[in-house]
Image (spheres, rainbow, N blue to C red):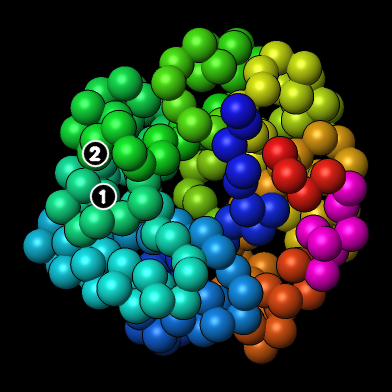
Amino acid sequence: MKLVFPRLYVILDAGLLRTSVREFAVRLAESGVELIQYRDKVSASQMLLSQAKEIVADLRPRGACLVVNDRADIAAISGAAGVHVGQEDIAPEGARTVCGAGRWVGISTHTAEQVRRAAATTADYIAVGPVFETRTKANSDPAVGLELIRRAKTMTEKPIVAIGGITLERAGEAYAAGADSVAIASDIILSADSGARARAYLEVAARVPGQEL
């Protein structure tokens, strides 16, 4: 049975936020966002854990889940729904050993070969990108375009998450190329009305055939 994966995956990059991560996470959940990733590359472990625990507690009664970027240990201790790792982080099997079998493990990929390898792991979903040019991450990989999304879709039954440079205008293209979900950071975080922007993405997602993955 395939994983039922939310069509919208919002990444809370602490470096972009203008308000507290907790406040922003609650705002998203109350706008209908079901899956949120907490990405903070600079805070100390103690702060990361404290924030993650608080966000998990805030999201749970609102029907939303938190995934922690990079840190499987923080995901496990905080009670988060899972962890997302990159190519230079702990491998999916190692991440699962740390955070537990009941949590999601996602992995970022940037080439067809990385997708192939990720498909052979126990990762629950595979993020592919950056699909378009993005300035959200420093030293990001070159844009891979929609073609890698199409190719990845033929290589695995795991959910494919399009990430990198996705905007409201481009989300439909990513879904049409085969993405099961789109991951958004700056286009929602930096919006004048982030809640309304998130709802606009959810409206685009609602028009995609086959919500049950």
Answer above or below: position of 148 versus 193. above
Choose top left, top right, bottom left or bottom right for residue 156.
top right
* Quarter of the picture holding the N terminus: top right
Answer above or below: position of 195 versus 149. below
- Residue visible at 40% across and 59% down? 66
Report which residue position mark 1 lands on.
75
Which three-letter amino acid code belongs to the residue tagged 2? Answer: Cys
Viewer-proximal residue among 213 and 180: 213
- Residue visible at 89% across and 42% down? 176
- Number of callouts in the render? 2
- Residue at the far left: name it: 46
Report which residue position mark 2 lands on.
99
Answer above or below: position of 123 versus 204. above
- Residue visible at 65% across and 58% down? 8
Residue 80 appears in the figure: yes
Magenta-colored span = 203-209
* Quarter of the picture holding the C terminus: top right
- Marks 2 & 1, CB-CB < 8 Å contact: yes
